[in-house]
Image (cartoon, rainbow, N blue to C red):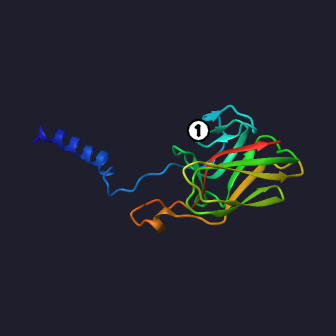
Amino acid sequence: MKNLRPLFVLGLLLVIMVGGCGPSQAPVYPQVIVWSGKPNEARYAATPQEGIDFRKDGYPDFLAEVSGVSGLETWGRWTDAAMGSAATFRFRQPLPKKFTVQIVVHSISVAQIVKVRVGTSEKEVTIQEGGAAPTTYDVPMESDGTADSLAITSMKLFIPHEHNPNSADVRKLGIPLQALKILS
């Protein structure tokens, strides 16, 4: 019996390690509730004009905080209403008085309207359904020169589990972001 104990423990460990990997288990989707730009979090050097590359790990050093965005996927990141009512980007410096928000959206299968807000200024943009290529949207914005946050709110959300009962993905997805730039 003594010699069987290590085999039992090893078998138990294998069941624990492998048990969650079977086809009946739901995939785990990366999520970020709030990225706060703390020193130990992934950061990369960029300017607001070079923008946010949602295909990279972490966020550029010109941002102070990000919320309402799911975790990294190979093509970019989703806006995710389960993580915040809007995808919100707080900058370390105020945004210019006049500028263009350039949003690059990965392919999307259903057209939808999003609202882009900076301070009290808000614009609606219709994101068109597209093929395999990303689509770029330029949104002219104005602020009083003191606003340091930009919010993107999706008016139509997609919950994968509601469209495919075999999916355990219950995120409230908006638009698939690939890049976002602030152009003066």
Question: Does 158 sit left or right of 92 as displayed?
Answer: left
Q: Residues within 10 Å of mark 1 (few under 14, many from 20)?
A: some
Q: What element does badge 1 sit on?
A: loop
Q: Position of residue 27 (x, y in %)?
A: 41, 53
Quarter of the image for the C terminus: give it: top right
Percent x, y of residue 160: 49, 62
Name the spot of residue 77 as percent of width and height, x first.
58, 48
Tag count: 1
Residue 175: name its quadrant: bottom right
> Measuring 58% from the left and 38% from the top, which residue is drawn there?
56
On the image, the x and y values in percent for residue 108 come to: 57, 57
* Type of the residue with mark 1: Lys
38 in relation to 137, above or below: above
Would you identify the image quadrant in which residue 63 lies? top right
Identify the residue at horizontal 43%, vertical 65% (top origin). 164
Residue at left 9%, top 42%?
A: 1
**Which residue is disc 1 drawn over?**
56
Q: Nearer the viewer, residue 130 or 151?
A: 130
As rendered, which of 34 and 78 lies closer to the eye?
A: 78
